[in-house]
Amino acid sequence: MTARPTRLFALVLAAGALAVAGCAPSQSGTGSNAGSDSDSDTTATGDAAGGEEAAGSVKVGIIYSETGPLAAYGQQFKEGLEAGLDYATDGTGEVDGTQIELTYRDDAGNPDTAVAAAKDLIGQEYKIMGGTVVSGIAVAMAEQAEQNQVLYISGPAATDQTTGANEYTFRSGRQSLQDVATAAAFLPDEGDNKIVVLAQDNAFGQGNFAAVQAVLGADGDEVTSVLVPEDATEFTSFARQVIDAEPDLIFVAWAGASAGNMWQSLEQQSVFDVAPVVTGLGDSATFGAYGPVADKISFLNHYFPGATDNEANTALVEHVEAAGGTPDLFTNDGFVMGQMIVQAVGEGGGEDVNAMIEALEGWEFEGPKGTLTIREGDHALLQPMFTVQLNQDGEAWVPELLDTIPADQVAPPEASGR
């Protein structure tokens, strides 16, 4: 599948957001090496943790969802982070003799909890902060980074607001504009389409709606939304609102345990007979949640283990599986954060924040998805995106790569907030 050339640069931005919006059920597990007390769990990476004392150390605060609605995503992120650090340090956990020590804090999906944890760690003179799968938390963390002049690398959180937020904030995952742009592969050549965004009424859902408006709306399509309260458990009325809008295309941006009921309501109300439905492919635990509608959905995706075949992806898969985990949707975002931390410490020393920022700006490197570039002007992470279909294999559903959308074709417009 190919997107319309005149729209691809902008449109590919939108599809990725939806892809990562992946309808994953909430789980409360933790990743490998998680301590029994996440509020004080400190892990020295690599073999050096138990061997001779390194010449020095750098402490990195990782704030993520060990518990809460998106704990399953948090686990994937943490496993990927540890794999990425191991890969980028050749298994030593050190950069030029400096040990990287991770301190984990549980944000429980709550911005206030995350900010309190960040303030505590910053008060202990931590210069590097990372993490979160929650868009609202990423925005709050970016504010803390600027106020306290520390380096912050956001994880899987898709909100566009962290890109260009300030000079101290970077990201290791894709953003909603990249999600939306990928959807160009499923749009007709003509303009004047009516597009409805069905999303949860939170920072993630609102961000997706804004991205679709910015990308597709600017290209002449009419974009409206049906926003659903996060605590909703009955979706019939919202499905009817989608139908009444008479759309030509339906974008679904969803995350969390209510996904199965939402998809069932769309099927029961015959929404799939009205217009094509595009969404992000969630993590593997959600594949069964699509149920009988799986083959009716056009999927956008920013990562699954079979999407690429390169050294970094092989290392990701092998490390996570050896630790007893399963590589999944957000494992890549953690892995890339590990690579970014090592680059910042190796080139910037771990203490000089300005030097670490300079080390990351404009950096091009090979991640599990392929070639990634941190855009100097606004710290957007330029990366390829994917279109995917789900195929049934016995009782299981297996993702199949349809197309890889090059990074430059889904690069978001440069943010002007800095």
Image (spheres, rainbow, N blue to C red):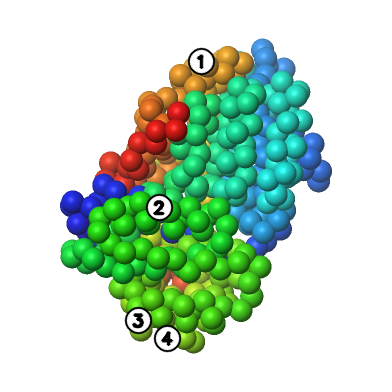
Compared with 364, 242 (above or below) is below
Mark 4 in CB contact with mark 3 (< 8 angstroms):
yes
Q: Are marks 2 and 1 in contact (CB under 8 Å)?
A: no
Q: Which residue is mark 1?
A: 355
* Mark nearer the N terminus (1 vs 3): 3
Q: Tell me the element at label 2.
A: helix
- Judged from the image, the secondary structure of the residue bearing numbered disc 1 is helix
Which numbered tag is attached to residue 329? none
Q: Amino acid at mark 3?
A: Val
Mark seen at residue 270: 4
The CA distance from mark 3 to mark 2 is 23 Å
- Work out whether residue 196 or residue 316 is closer to the camera in this orientation and state it: 196
How far apart, in angstroms, are the residues tagged by discs 4 and 3?
A: 7 Å
Q: Which residue is mark 2?
A: 211
Which residue corresponds to the image point at 35% horizontal and 78% vertical from the top-left?
246
Q: CA distance from mark 4 to mark 2?
A: 26 Å
